[in-house]
Image: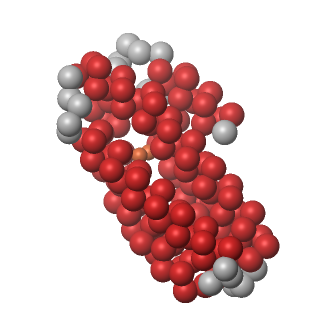
Amino acid sequence: MSITTPLFQHHKHCDDLFADAESACGNGDWEAGGRLFALLRDQLEAHFSSEEELLFPAFEAATGMTSGPTEVMRGEHRQMRDLLGQMSSGLADRDGDTFSGAAETLLILMQQHNMKEENILYPMCDNALGASDIGATLSERLKAS
Ligand SMILES: [Fe+2]
Ligand SMILES: [Fe+2]
């Protein structure tokens, strides 16, 4: 198991939550949709902050690369947090168009973001941090969330 395996697996978990929340809201089940969305937002926040507070700083310290891929990923996390905020407003107003418009954009952004991490940044992190025990911390943190 590599350092980034827990993050890899957690992408899949968040994808599943996203699909469940979107289909509940799409069917007009705002109660279930609201619960699922809250779970999704919590899990995504735990994921983003694990990367921003643990993985990225460790990678930056090991490689000296502070203005490369990690900076791009932090920017995309900001955009995804914005979209989650828009989805949350849509939910609060029971406004299906606002919710699904933001959800659609988030899904595309999330897929592209995760692909970049899985294919490029995570392998770079695994290489740079081979001997680090950060993987266990990531695993604990995402399990506890
Ligand atoms: Fe990320
Ligand atoms: Fe990620």
Q: Residue 31 vs residue 69: left or right?
A: right
Counting from the top left corner in percent of width and height, residue 4 is at 44, 33
Asked whether, in this view, residue 13 is left or right of residue 134, the answer is right
Q: In this view, does 75 lie to the left or right of 143?
A: left
Q: Determine the quadrant in which ligand 2 lies.
A: top left
Relative to 134, residue 41 above or below = below
Query: Is residue 5 in sight in this rendering?
Result: no
Q: Quadrant of residue 90?
A: bottom right
Residue at the far right: name it. Answer: 31
Return the residue nearer the eye: 52 or 128.
52
Which residue sits at x=36%, y=26%?
A: 57
Identify whether 95 is placed above or below 88: below
Give the quarter of the figure containing the C terminus: top right
Q: Nearer the viewer, residue 66 or 126?
A: 66
Q: In this view, does 98 lie above or below 9?
A: below
How many discs appear? 0
Relative depth, front residue between 11 and 98: 98
In percent of width and height, residue 139 lies at 57, 30
- Image-quadrant location for residue 37: bottom right
Left or right of residue 54: residue 116: left
Identify which residue is drawn at 36% across, 23% down.
58
Image coordinates of residue 20 in percent, x first then y, are: 65, 68
**Residue located at (65% from left, 35% from top):** 143
Q: Where is residue 81 in the image (x, y as percent from the top left)?
A: 48, 56
Looking at the image, can residue 139 be seen? yes
Farthest residue toward the top? 131
